[in-house]
């Protein structure tokens, strides 16, 4: 296999709203470049990048796919990312190792929710951006309106490079404003492209778009600007250098008109990518930290430097095992090379290095700086790990995956499957770090969390398909806490049992009172005169603590109470630790119920970002969920609501917010404090607990 230098590589991530045609675009690009011999269709389940059973069944991308092609002796690495927000973690993986993001927009719908969501990620990373206006063959296509909206809502740097000669069902020709020629495409599969003069009805638009492009390029440099004003144009070489520089500094985002379904506009797009998109060695230099000193260092994208690779994705293949997808940030890696995992300190051998087209692997002997590949069966390496040489122990910044928006508790169908389920869930987390799992001892449930209902539902489905493990997904229990508002001054409890032979006897007087919130539990021994021998006092405390752990009202932990034992009696024969432990437990329970017991619930800070026109609906919904609005801020076309809301009201809020905002809303939560539960809610919780105890 040919090895490409960094200058001959282009790494691009295809991003955008679901249904914009990213997977279809990769199909026609692979076919156009001769990488495949047929054009697959999403509807037929035979595309290169959407190859898993769930993707074939649902007809949309779920996982990131790595693809590659060669165009004019330049290697184009394509990272096809999902469009649905439940899989935003996959988009972050793709953008981490890309040098340019290509956002697809539909020629009718234009800028959609996923466009704005993924743009935020692109801006966070400071990546150059390009646009593909796809589906120009739709009869309601409106290319100019889509470009206008892209400038208004996404970036003022959006500048047309190719535009349709005619839109709608007859679309087969694009006008290229860099080459100032028109290109007519033959039927899909023919690969026939005819260069021609620009049609008369398109000349005015072509001149206007070219002028806009040159002006955008000239803005970069005073000398270019002066020349443009003096001569009215720039040379081809000046334009070439200027376009690339403008893309790198993000002042220019080229816009391409295409139909992936009809294969129109592909060659012009590929020509532009090869000539003008930044190579890995031309963009922003990657930074890392030296492992021991944490000192920041630059990682040059040079083949003759020390090798540094970053694992950006882990894929579990049925007959292969785990496949680690990586980008070579520096140096050159060869099959059989040993590198050190700088996150764990362990040595890893790169046995088989491959380049991917979906599930299809091509083995290669080496990959140079800037390239993307995959390696099979690393012993102890995971997504976000950096592998480097002994002499350059550097760690790259990890991908920051989004916080969970939805949590669910899993209940196994079969007893004894717990260990197997834990291992399987861990494997799913390795593949998708935005899917998390943990056992919560406070509510005794295994909790899985992710970006939405679809995200969790697919995880449950994978458990069944891959590992033959069946579980139910239910709403997690709320970790309420119990406490008191009043005092019980003198609680007497006598445990006395005689059943032949030695009996049981424990007699105590307790005082129970509330502690300030957050102070915890305090036990005081105030017995005088030896009525309760000192050796039995720890048993009383143990009985109280065990009852506090089990709870009394709702089966939830008791907090913030002070218990004082101040009197009692004992029997010289029948008294023992167990008797006083039972007395402590029952006495505390009796006193707790007399001291105005209450339930506390977890309250979370909630920050919701929504479009202006959704404000009323979202505010009304928050009020119905017992939310307290703390304040509001503006952010462009969006409003940011800050509120506090009980955890019990957040379950499936992601789905409700998507429904209320047509998918344009986003939110985050963070635990704040515990607060008293309203009496009507407390009554329901207590009643449900009593009912569950009866059923047991």
Image (spheres, rainbow, N blue to C red):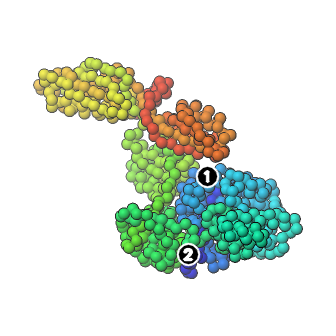
The location of residue 487, given as percent across then percent down, is 32, 21
Which corner quadrant holds the C terminus?
A: top left
- Give 137 or 242, whichever is nearer the viewer: 242
How dense is the environment of label 2, judged by Cα within 10 Å: few (below 14), some, or many (20 and up)?
many
Q: Is residue 314 left or right of residue 20?
A: left
Residue 231 in the image: state x and y as whole percent. Answer: 77, 72
Q: Residue at x 50, y 75 (%)?
A: 302
Asked if one can make out residue 22 in the rendered structure from this viewpoint, the answer is no
- Residue drawn where x is 50% and y is 63% of the image: 312
Rendered location of residue 16, percent (x, y): 64, 57
Can you tell which mark lies on residue 6?
2
Query: In the picture, residue 146 is in which quadrant?
Result: bottom right
Q: Is residue 353 above or below residue 583?
A: below
- State the image quarter where residue 13 is shown: bottom right
Residue 679 vertical position relative to residue 147 in the rendered view, above or below: above
Residue count near mark 1 (Cα–Cα under 10 Å), binned few <14, some 14–19, many ≥20: many
- The tag on residue 117 is 1
């Amino acid at each position: 296999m040919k090895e490409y230098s960094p200058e001959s590589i282009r790494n691009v991530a295809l991003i955008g709203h679901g249904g914009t045609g990213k997977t279809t675009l990769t199909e026609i690009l692979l076919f156009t470049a001769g990488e495949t011999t047929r054009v697959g269709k999403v509807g037929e389940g035979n595309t290169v990048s959407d190859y898993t059973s769930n993707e074939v069944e649902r007809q949309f991308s779920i996982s990131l796919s790595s693809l590659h092609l060669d165009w004019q002796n330049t290697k184009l690495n394509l990272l096809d990312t999902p469009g649905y927000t439940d899989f935003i973690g996959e988009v972050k993986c793709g953008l981490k190792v890309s040098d340019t993001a290509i956002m697809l927009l539909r020629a009718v719908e234009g800028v959609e929710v996923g466009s704005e969501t993924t743009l935020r990620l692109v801006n966070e990373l400071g990546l150059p951006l390009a646009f593909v206006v796809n589906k120009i063959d739709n009869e309601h296509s409106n290319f100019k309106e889509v470009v206008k909206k892209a400038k208004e809502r996404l970036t003022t740097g959006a500048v047309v490079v190719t535009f349709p000669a005619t839109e709608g069902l007859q679309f087969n020709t694009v006008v290229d404003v860099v080459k100032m020629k028109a290109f007519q495409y033959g039927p899909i599969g023919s690969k026939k492209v005819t260069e021609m003069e620009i049609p008369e009805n398109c000349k005015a638009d072509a001149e206007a778009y070219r002028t806009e492009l040159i002006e955008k390029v000239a803005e970069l440099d005073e000398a270019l600007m002066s020349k443009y004003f003096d001569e009215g144009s720039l040379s081809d070489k000046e334009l070439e250098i200027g376009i690339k520089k403008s893309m790198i500094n993000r002042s220019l985002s080229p816009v391409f008109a295409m139909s992936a379904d009809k294969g129109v506009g592909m060659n012009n797009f590929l020509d532009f990518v090869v000539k003008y998109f930044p190579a890995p060695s031309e963009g922003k230099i990657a930074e890392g930290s030296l492992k021991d000193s944490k000192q920041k260092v630059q990682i040059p994208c040079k083949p003759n430097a020390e090798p540094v690779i970053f694992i950006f994705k882990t894929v579990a293949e049925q007959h292969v095992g785990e496949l680690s997808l990586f980008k070579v940030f520096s140096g050159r890696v060869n099959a059989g090379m040993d590198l050190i995992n700088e996150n764990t300190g362990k040595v890893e051998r790169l046995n088989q290095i491959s380049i991917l087209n979906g599930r299809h692997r091509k083995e290669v002997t080496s990959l140079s700086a800037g390239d993307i590949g995959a390696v099979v069966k690393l012993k102890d390496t995971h997504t976000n790990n950096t592998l480097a040489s002994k002499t350059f122990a550097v760690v790259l910044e990890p991908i920051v995956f989004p916080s969970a928006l939805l949590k669910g508790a899993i209940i196994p169908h079969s007893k004894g499957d717990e260990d197997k389920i834990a291992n399987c869930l861990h494997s799913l987390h390795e593949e998708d770090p935005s899917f998390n799992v943990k056992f919560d001892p406070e509510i005794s449930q295994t909790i899985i969390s992710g970006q939405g209902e679809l995200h969790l539902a697919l995880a449950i489905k994978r458990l069944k398909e891959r590992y033959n493990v069946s579980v139910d997904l239910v709403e997690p229990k709320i970790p309420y806490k119990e406490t008191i508002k009043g005092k019980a001054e003198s609680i007497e409890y006598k445990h006395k049992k005689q059943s032949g032979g030695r009996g049981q006897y424990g007699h105590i007087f307790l005082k129970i009172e509330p502690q300030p919130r957050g102070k915890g539990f305090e036990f005081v021994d105030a017995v005088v005169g030896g009525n309760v021998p000192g050796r039995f006092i720890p048993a009383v405390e143990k009985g109280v603590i065990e009852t506090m752990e089990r709870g009394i009202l709702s089966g939830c932990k008791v907090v913030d109470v002070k218990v004082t034992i101040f009197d009692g009696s004992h029997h010289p024969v029948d008294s023992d630790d167990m008797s006083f432990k039972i007395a402590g437990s029952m006495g505390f329970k009796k006193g707790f119920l007399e001291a105005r017991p209450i339930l506390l619930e977890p309250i979370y800070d909630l920050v919701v970002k929504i479009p202006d026109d959704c404000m009323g609906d979202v505010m009304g919904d928050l009020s119905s969920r017992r939310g307290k609005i703390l304040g509001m801020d503006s952010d462009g076309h969006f409003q940011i609501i800050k509120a506090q809301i009980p955890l019990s009201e957040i379950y499936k809020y992601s789905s409700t917010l998507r429904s209320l905002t047509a998918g344009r809303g986003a939110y985050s939560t963070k635990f704040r404090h515990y607060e008293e539960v309203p009496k009507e809610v407390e009554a329901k919780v207590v009643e449900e607990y009593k009912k569950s105890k009866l059923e047991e």
